[in-house]
Image (cartoon, rainbow, N blue to C red):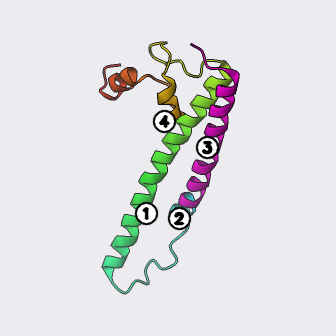
Amino acid sequence: MPLKKNELAYFKKRLEEMKTQVLRALQGTKKEVTEPDQSKGYSQHSADEGTDDFVKSINLEVTNKEFGLLRQIERALEKIDEGTYGVCDISGEEIPIKRLEAIPYATMTVKAQEKCEKGLL
């Protein structure tokens, strides 16, 4: 059964709020990763430099995951505009409302998602 207008409005609002949060987080992380390290070369110990590099690597990994989440949120918002939100991109089946409540940016059913993650699609 297709989603009602009030349900679509609810999910759109949630997705837009999530998008705002992710963009804020990306902005902060991007600043940490791209700012030149003023203390570089002035460390008292070489382990400090290694720690700084490790922290930057972790921040880059977090940034990559946030970009992936942002892409998923944007795709879900596109689907709302297209009128296909709540329909699996792969199978064309309806995505259960419980799944959308848990993961509003879901664009696939659980079954299709599992196949995709296993590389079967």
The amino acid at mark 3 is: Lys
Asked whether residue 103 is in view, the answer is no
Asked if marks 1 and 3 touch (Cβ < 8 Å), the reply is: no
Q: Position of residue 50 (x, y in %)?
A: 34, 71
Q: Is residue 74 above or below residue 84?
A: below
Residue count near mark 2 (Cα–Cα under 10 Å), binned few <14, some 14–19, many ≥20: some
The C terminus - image quarter: top left
Q: Which residue corresponds to mark 3?
A: 19
Q: Counting residues from the N terminus, which is met first, the one under dot 4 or under dot 2? A: 2
Which label sits in the foreground, 4 or 1? 4
Q: Which residue corresponds to mark 2?
A: 32
* Residue closer to the observer: 76 or 121: 76
Secondary structure under tag 3 reads: helix
Q: Which residues, given as a range, are shown in magenta?
A: 1-29
Q: Which residue corresponds to mark 1?
A: 56
The N terminus - image quarter: top right
Left or right of 97 on screen, residue 54: left
Which residue is drawn at the image coordinates 39% and 20% (left, top)?
Answer: 112
Q: Which residue corresponds to mark 4?
A: 102
Asked whether residue 16 is in view, the answer is yes
| Prevalent SS, magenta region | helix
Q: Position of residue 78 (x, y in %)?
A: 63, 27
Q: Counting residues from the N terminus, which is met first, the one under dot 4 or under dot 1? A: 1
Q: Counting residues from the N terminus, which is met first, the one under dot 2 or under dot 3? A: 3
Report the Cα–Cα distance between label 1 and label 3: 23 Å
Query: Residue 110 appears in which quarter of the rendering?
Result: top left
Which residue is drawn at the image coordinates 43% and 63% (left, top)?
Answer: 56
Which label sits in the foreground, 4 or 2? 4
